[in-house]
């Protein structure tokens, strides 16, 4: 059984959950990717308690997903901008969103639609081979032991 942390797990997913696995963290990253920047914007969007939001924003800054930038001198006010590390989560965020649209759907339809700014077409995440560029179906993916796996997988 997993405890409160995943420190003893030799798993990239577990290490990722250490950063964004807390209930509010991925929703804050989602909002940052949507363009929210200020504390009040996050609070209004999420309905989260101020003390919880403060802790989550602080951790996301410490983990390098958000950058805290002063936008006003007196009084000092800050905004939280997504870093490239947060932007690298876009595919995962979209995958979760599209999964929810399909398997935990709202009767009124999806809350958001992803369109390509260039042509207006629908954007979908997909698996692709880095060698041949072919789109790969999930049943054609093989997960093999990597260099960090020193004991046989369970």
Image (cartoon, rainbow, N blue to C red):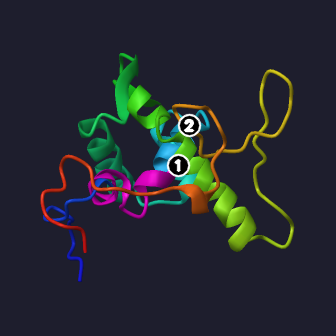
* Residue corresponding to mark 1: 92
**Relative image position of residue 4 (x, y in whole percent):** 21, 72
Examine the rendering and report whether any part of residue 41 can be seen: no
Question: Relative to the observer, which residue lies in front, 7 or 67?
Answer: 7
Query: Taken as a whole, is the magenta stretch helix, strand or loop?
Result: helix
Q: Read off the magenta span.
A: 13-27
* Residue corresponding to mark 2: 33
**Relative image position of residue 141 (x, y in whole percent):** 52, 55
Q: Residues within 10 Å of mark 1 (few under 14, many from 20)?
A: few
Question: Relative to the observer, which residue lies in front, 50 or 84?
Answer: 84
Task: Check the image and name the residue furthest to the top.
Answer: 73
For the N terminus, which image quadrant? bottom left
Number of marks present in the image shown: 2
Examine the rendering and report whether any part of residue 8 can be seen: yes
**Relative image position of residue 143 (x, y in whole percent):** 40, 57
Residue appearing at x 79%, y 36% in the figure: 115
Residue appearing at x 28%, y 43% in the figure: 58
Is 23 on the left-hand or right-hand side of 91? Answer: left
Question: Relative to the observer, which residue lies in front, 107 or 44?
Answer: 107
- Residue 83, quarter of the rendered image: top left
Numbered badge on residue 131: none
Residue appearing at x 86%, y 30% in the figure: 120
- Residue 41, quarter of the rendered image: top right
Question: SS for tag 1?
Answer: helix
């Amino acid at each position: 059984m997993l405890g409160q942390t995943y420190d003893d797990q030799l798993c990239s997913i577990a290490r990722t959950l250490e950063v964004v696995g807390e209930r509010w963290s991925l929703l804050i990253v989602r909002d940052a990717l949507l363009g929210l920047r200020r504390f009040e914007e996050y609070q209004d969007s999420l309905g989260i308690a101020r003390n919880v939001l403060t802790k989550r924003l602080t951790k996301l800054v410490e983990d390098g997903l958000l950058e805290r930038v002063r936008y006003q001198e007196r009084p000092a006010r800050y905004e939280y901008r997504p870093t490239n590390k947060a932007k690298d989560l876009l595919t995962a965020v979209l995958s979760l969103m599209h999964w929810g649209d399909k398997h935990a759907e709202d009767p009124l339809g999806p809350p958001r639609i992803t369109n390509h700014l260039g042509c207006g077409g629908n954007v979908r995440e997909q698996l692709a081979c880095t060698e041949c560029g072919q789109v790969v179906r999930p049943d054609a993916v093989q997960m093999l032991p990597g260099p960090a796996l020193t004991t046989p997988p369970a």
